[in-house]
Image (cartoon, rainbow, N blue to C red):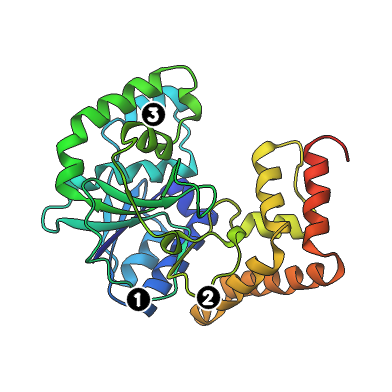
Amino acid sequence: MKWYFALNEAGALGDLGLHAKLALLSARQVGGLEPRLLYHGARNGFTEWMEARDVPVIDAAPRFLAALQATAGEQPSPLLGHWLRVGICLLEADDPFVLYTDCDVVFRRRINFTPCQPEYFACGPERTPEDWSFVNTGVMVQNVAGLRSDYPAFEAFIEATLAGAGGAELNDQHVYNVFYNGRWSRLHPLLNWKPYWGFHRDAPIVHFHGPKLGHMRMALDGRVDWNVKILRLYASLFLANLPHYAATLEEMLPLLEGEPEARGLVEGIVRDARALHGVVPYDVIAASLAARAAGRD
């Protein structure tokens, strides 16, 4: 199955670039996926790394890029690449169904997606494995023709929403949930499993939704600015679930035999997470973080 992932230049130069390499290495290990990288920005060492591993790097931009820039400014967010998934249905000319994932996933098992043929797209839940009120678009099986038929209306909806109140904080996941409310199909939660849900040996795809490797290192080093809401959230998720993250990351180490810098980073996170967990139980850490977030600590 064709597997699309997407990144822009700002993302490639940070944590998301490292996660994208991990995603590709794990995909190669499990097999059955044909990677396609959608990329926006100047070519660099990251794109060279991908091309050296026979990954087609496809220059792409959202057709509504001007609306995004008018809302968020010219400085590209590292998350701009996420919007590139919207255009997959315009690019793909051969296959009726394709897989899209965010860059921060790891493939752990080979998957047969043939039975999954949604009318538009299939996704797993966002908040908990049981809550289907809002889906996480970090892993999507896309019906190319179905999404292409809706594309003009979807693009118009995106542009109108960007221009509205709160448009500057809009993300693509939100517009998918609103525009396709009641029309998306369910993807098994194990195909978009988050470490903060627990360590699950049978999950074929693990999604590092929320804290990335850099956030984990920052939390372990005590460098989190607790006044920044998103950093507080990421640190809380990680520190409250240390054993789950440590077990998940430890599984990734064999993928990094040829990437010493990345392997050193992951090894250090695993080592320090296990040491911290051995000193303070993670439920105590969670309670402390919750109190701090509530202004009681």
Seen from the viewer's position, the closer of residues 228 and 282 is 282
Q: Which residue is mark 1?
A: 110
- Of labels 1 and 3, earlier in sequence is 3
Q: Quick one: quadrant of the C terminus?
A: top right
Q: Is residue 261 visible?
A: no
For discs 2 and 3, the disc positioned in front in the rendered view: 2
Label 2 sits on a secondary structure element that is loop
Judged left or right of residue 285, residue 25 is left
Q: Is residue 182 visible?
A: yes
The residue positioned 47% from the left and 69% from the top of the image is: 203
Q: Are marks 2 and 3 in contact (CB under 8 Å)?
A: no
- Quadrant of res 49: bottom left
CA–CA distance in space, label 1 to label 2: 14 Å
Judged left or right of residue 266, residue 219 is right
Q: Which residue is mark 3?
A: 68
CA–CA distance in space, label 1 to label 3: 36 Å
Q: Quick one: quadrant of the N terminus?
A: bottom left
Q: Are marks 1 and 3 in contact (CB under 8 Å)?
A: no
- Which disc number belongs to residue 82? none
Label 1 sits on a secondary structure element that is loop
How many residues crowd mark 2 within 10 Å: few (<14), some (14–19), many (20+)?
Answer: few
Label 3 sits on a secondary structure element that is helix
Q: Is residue 12 above or below residue 179?
A: below
Indicate the amino acid at tag 3.
Leu
